[in-house]
Amino acid sequence: MSESFPGENPVTFLQLVSPEGVRVASETADPWLDDVSGADLVALYQDMVVVRRIDTEATALQRQGELGLWPPLLGQEAAQIGSARALRADDFVFTSYRENAVAWCRGVGLTDIVRVWRGNAQSGWDPYSVGMATPAIIIGAQTLHATGWALGAQHDGTDSVAVAYFGDGATSEGDVSEALVFAASFQAPVIFFCQNNQWAISEPVGLQSRANLVDRALGFGIPGIRVDGNDVLAVLAATRMALHRARTGGGPTFIEAVTYRMGPHTTADDPTRYRPAAELEEWRAKDPILRLERLLDSLGLLSSELADQTKGLADAAAAELRAGCIGLADPEPLTVFDHVFATPNATLDRQRAEYAHYLASFDSTGGKA
């Protein structure tokens, strides 16, 4: 196993826990984990189990017709939990549509996570209350948002950091390149966190990139680190390194978390049509939760009591998600105009009035009056 610290050496690969659950020593990364106790390891494990259970429940809700769509995160729990748990409350997160584990860590309510996917809202939560923007569906757009926020933080003289989460496919989008240019030019305190899950919908990552994705950042003058995205400790350490660099004026960092999307791209997708079964089985052996379980077991921290407690937490979260989803009331039609602009304006007011007049033309049975 080779490694590098962002900005110092050529990018290689950071792994601190092997798929067999063996802790791998690292002179570079270990100092960033000195404060991680056994209880902290247990908390990371429970986070991953709970978000996998939430993900499974949301997928079931979609199959049962309660959600219009759902983007599963199965297999990517360590990449999301390890990075999100490194953040401070005053950092700000910008994600795509799959980072529901990040939302969990930021304190987003479970019902709020599914509002959009049920079609009950244009966005699920107040971004300022949790330090996380609502998901960007336009691929790669959030990297520009994150860079802009980071430039604002830099201008304000704070040491807060922006984090942009995106997938391997987004690195081919122009928005991402533009964000990298601006971040490098102004040394913005932003982390570009790429979850390379090997597949952009139905196409493998090798089709769009013949080299490691992190190498693209180096071309923009942004240092990076390639990390085992199924190793929650390696992700935690890499993110802490990048955060420290950003907080101390070192500028942006690109993290490529090498992981795997074990489920479909969304619930509208059938990965068996394009993905080899043998590849999936190969990655099952690298499962992030199983890996941490093995480490906990080797440390004497995995007990039947912990298993029962963790299952209880996961089941309770799933039950809350289901009840919250099914209990969502249909929004009033005119609320479509809420939050379009920060302040009211005459054009929007006119459109609202015209739509209200149109709705009033229907009688109570839904027919024209």
Image: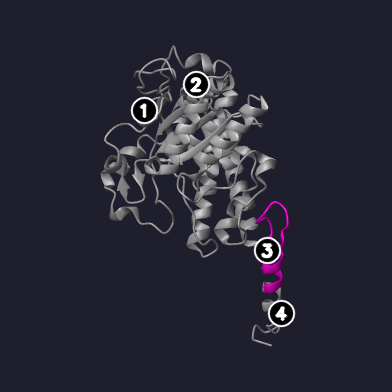
Taking the magenta stretch, the answer to whether it contains residue 360 is no
- Residue at the top extreme of this rendering: 27
Any mark on residue 342, and which?
Answer: none
Q: Which residue is mark 4?
A: 360
Q: Name which of mark 2 and mark 1 comes first in the sequence.
A: 1
Element carrying mark 2: loop
Q: Which mark is residue 299?
A: 2
Residue 350 image point, x, y percent: 70, 68
| Picture quadrant where residue 169 is located | top left
Q: Amino acid at mark 2?
A: Leu
- Residue 310: horizontal and vertical position, in percent? 57, 38
Magenta stretch, residue numbers: 330-354
Q: Nearer the viewer, residue 349 or 21?
A: 349
Q: Judging from the image, what secondary structure is the residue with disc 1 in? A: helix
Q: Rate crowding at label 4 as few (under 14), some (14 to 19) or many (20 or more) other CA atoms within 10 Å.
A: few
The earlier-in-sequence mark between 2 and 3 is 2
Q: Nearer the viewer, residue 99 or 138?
A: 138
> Alpha-carbon distance for marks 4 and 2?
67 Å
The quadrant in which the C terminus is found is bottom right
* Front label number (2 vs 3): 3
